[in-house]
Image (tube, rainbow, N blue to C red):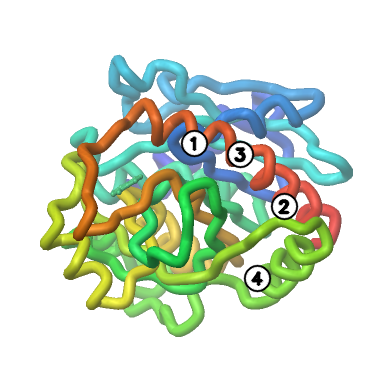
């Protein structure tokens, strides 16, 4: 990754009309309905943006969407890049750097995740307060990182406290159950074994998924305030583990998304 490449990606989008969005939003697996809330939208397919990671076949619909939601201008990633698709840490976080250079001031991130904390149920939303990186690498471990910011990035409070407080108050007011906890990121794409779910619990994770942490690390590198939620799609009980049902995971994500959209839209009004 070079600054020149980043400039070209950003210039392409600016020419298309992506004019200084205020908020960047990353949509997780099964979470695409938020796109219907965007007004006056302009789209850019990932494959058409210079230096964007090339989308795989199964991922051909990936696009960046610019527009307005309420009184805010947004840029939304419909579809994200995952390590398990064969991309590397620089690929999967490149879009965060692009959105930052376009001008976003805040980043909202979402994902579908399994509930390790068994007090939490599928169909609940969990506000991410902290994370554990179990992906075996970092998006900041590259030679010219110093051109882009600090190398030793502080991670003492990676998720913006002000937005966390606001979204908790919103959930209370709206009567939406909002769990809180620690998200552990794994590479995947295989799901976890019973022994791995036990390990994740011992480590202090409340939820597990295959994304988000690299994007959050880069957003911290860029000093971009982040708010992230997990939509809990399955309950990871090592003592009663059922075979994974991906169709059900996607279905639950879709059914839960309207609650997430409500929280996001209300938070947008307050920031
Ligand atoms: N494990 C990892 N990733 C996931 C899970 C899970 O149980 N559920 C949804 N994404």
Asked if disc 3 and disc 4 are in contact, CB closer than 8 Å, the reply is no
Mark 1 neighbour class, 10 Å CA radius: few under 14, some 14 to 19, many 20 or more:
many
Question: Can you see residue 147?
Answer: no
From the viewer's perspective, is the residue at label 1 or at label 4 nearer? 1
Q: Read off the residue under disc 2.
A: 263
User: Between marks 1 and 2, how big is the CA–CA gap?
Assistant: 17 Å
Q: Is residue 184 left or right of residue 40?
A: left
> Which of the two discs, 3 and 1, labels the residue nearer the N terminus?
1
Task: Choose the circle earlier in sequence order: 1 or 4.
Answer: 4
Disc number at residue 252? 1
Q: Is residue 262 above or below residue 119?
A: above
Please state which of the two labelled residues, at mark 3 or mark 1, is closer to the viewer.
Answer: 1
> Which residue corresponds to the image point at 54% horizontal and 69% vertical from the top-left?
180
Q: Which residue is mark 3?
A: 257
Tag shown at residue 164: 4
Q: Secondary structure at mark 2?
A: helix
Quadrant of the snapshot with the C terminus:
bottom right
Q: Nearer the viewer, residue 215 or 247?
A: 247
């Amino acid at each position: 990754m070079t600054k020149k490449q980043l400039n070209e990606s950003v210039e392409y989008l600016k020419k298309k009309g992506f004019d200084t969005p205020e908020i960047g939003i990353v949509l997780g697996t099964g979470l695409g309905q938020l796109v219907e809330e965007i007004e006056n939208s302009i789209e850019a397919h990932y494959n058409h943006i210079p230096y964007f990671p090339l989308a795989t076949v199964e991922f051909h619909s990936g696009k960046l969407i610019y527009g307005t939601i309420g009184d805010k201008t947004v840029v939304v990633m419909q579809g994200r890049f995952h390590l398990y698709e064969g991309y590397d840490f620089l690929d999967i976080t490149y879009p965060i750097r692009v959105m930052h250079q376009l001008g976003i001031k805040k980043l909202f991130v979402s994902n579908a995740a399994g509930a390790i904390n068994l007090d939490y149920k599928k169909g609940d939303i969990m506000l991410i307060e902290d994370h554990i990186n179990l992906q075996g690498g970092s998006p900041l471990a590259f030679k010219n990182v110093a051109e882009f910011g600090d190398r030793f990035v502080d991670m003492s409070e990676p998720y913006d406290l002000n937005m966390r407080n606001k979204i908790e108050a919103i959930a209370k007011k709206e009567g939406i159950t909002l769990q809180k906890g620690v998200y552990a990121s794994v590479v995947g794409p295989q799901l976890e074994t019973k022994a791995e779910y036990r390990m994740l619990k011992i480590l202090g994770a409340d939820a597990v998924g295959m994304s988000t942490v690299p994007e959050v690390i880069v957003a911290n590198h860029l000093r971009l305030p982040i708010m992230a939620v997990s939509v809990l799609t399955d309950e990871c009980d090592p003592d009663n583990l059922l075979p994974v049902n991906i169709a059900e995971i996607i279905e639950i994500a879709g059914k839960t998304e309207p609650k997430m959209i409500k929280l996001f839209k209300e938070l947008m009004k307050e920031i």
